Image (tube, helix red, strand yellow):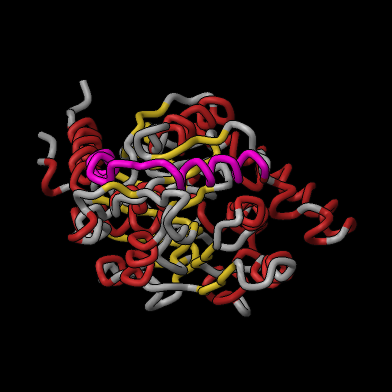
Amino acid sequence: MSRGVGTRKIALVHDWLTGMRGGEKVLEAVCERYPQAELFALVHIKGSVSPAIERLRPRTSFIQRLPMVRHAYRAYLPLFPTAIEQFDLDRFDLVVSMSHCCAKSIVRPGRARHLCYCLTPMRYAWDQFDAYFGPERMGRVSSAMMRQVMARMARWDRDTAGRADRYVAISHYVAGRIRRYYNRDATVVYPPVDTTYFTPPAAASLSPVSASPASPVRYALVVSALVPYKQVDLAIEACRLARVPLTIAGDGPERARLERVAGAVPGSVTFLGRQSDAEIRELYRGAAVTLLPGEEDFGIVPVEAQACGTPVVALGRGGAVETVVPGTTGILVDDGSAPAFADAIARATQTSFDSAAIRAHAERFSRERFVHEISDLIEGELRHGAEPLL
């Protein structure tokens, strides 16, 4: 006789826990829903994630004990396959991996089920090598060496795709990448966006968002990690052409270079660095438009901005196609060039958008909806695993 679903043991596996980004917000919601689960990660920087995650006391790999891991854990990337395969998961009935690198490649016991919530197949091993490890970033010799490492990682990533019984993707765009790289189908469950926190200001919630030619133009906003594939330099140039001030919230290895790029137009670009959620909410509320110049797998920032009633100008590729409604919640730009973005920014700041309609659209991506949908899938896998063998 099989055990009931409620008594079965769940393991949660995440790549690494070093801050509260989109993947960690997914994990947080799952941890709150399943507080008796056990959590595994390659690396955990204590205090870097939310209390709901910290309460599970994440178990880490041998990489946690290597030198300078707190600031340079990505330098150990070639060791990640070995590390993820060494987790002992024999006592669990279900493994739920949340993977953007290698968590999907855990070795599970034969009787357990494995559901992978795939944030994306490994970007730098498949289609974004140059953005992370190109010659202009590492030098020609180091880049050539890393290309060999990433080619091995891509083969390993493909060869271990069968370790998950079921894939769940964060968008139809990612589902397509899973099909292309892993030859697997995936159910789509959009990640959680805290639409109860990100809200319009009370006075503006029923009024249009616009900046007519006769009124002062408010700033355009970028909320982003400052890394190459985010294309923040495109936003800087587009705002220069559109003559719209740009505010950038976020930090990262590209900040010094981007500040030099922005220095050509003194006073038009403001770098704020990392901001709290409360500060970001106020930035969304005060912006004329939020920009997404890079191709994202889903893109939580545009949905947070829309939850605040603010329109979005985004590159018309990737997840933005699924989260931005052209003409209603913003503008999608087909041509990823600075002049095309500048034209879209100018049109957006001169268009009257209904902030209530923008907000209503964002509510489709709420946290409550995510918890309901992912719980149905997890409990379905538990029931599947509880079925007696015939």
Q: Quadrant of residue 340?
A: top right
State yes or no: residue 123 in magenta.
Answer: no
Q: Position of residue 327 (x, y in %)?
A: 40, 32
Q: Which residues are magenta?
A: 339-365
Q: Quadrant of residue 334?
A: top right
Q: Majority secondary structure of the magenta segment?
A: helix
- Seen as rendered, the residue at the extreme right is 141
Asked whether the viewer can see residue 167, the reply is no
Above or below, 20 against 355 in this view is below
Residue 35 located left or right of residue 147: left
Asked whether the viewer can see residue 287, the reply is yes
Q: Position of residue 3 (x, y in %)?
A: 12, 41
Q: Decide which of 286, 23 is in the foreground and name it.
A: 286
Please tell me which residue is depicted at 44% across the width and 53% down the height of the picture: 214
For the image shown, how many numbered marks are present on the structure? 0
State yes or no: residue 344 in magenta.
Answer: yes
Q: Position of residue 313 (x, y in %)?
A: 49, 44
Please tell me which residue is depicted at 59% across the width and 34% down the height of the picture: 159
- Seen as rendered, the residue at the extreme top is 390
Q: Position of residue 168 (x, y in %)?
A: 37, 35
Q: Decide which of 125, 263 is in the foreground and name it.
A: 263
Above or below, 54 against 83 in this view is below
Q: Quadrant of the N terminus?
A: top left
Above or below, 355 against 260 in this view is above
Q: Quadrant of the C terminus?
A: top left
Please tell me which residue is depicted at 13% across the width and 41% down the height of the picture: 5
Please tell me which residue is depicted at 37% across the width and 73% down the height of the picture: 276
Q: Decide which of 390, 141 is in the foreground and name it.
A: 141
Q: Decide which of 49, 303 is in the foreground and name it.
A: 303
Residue 141 located left or right of residue 344: right
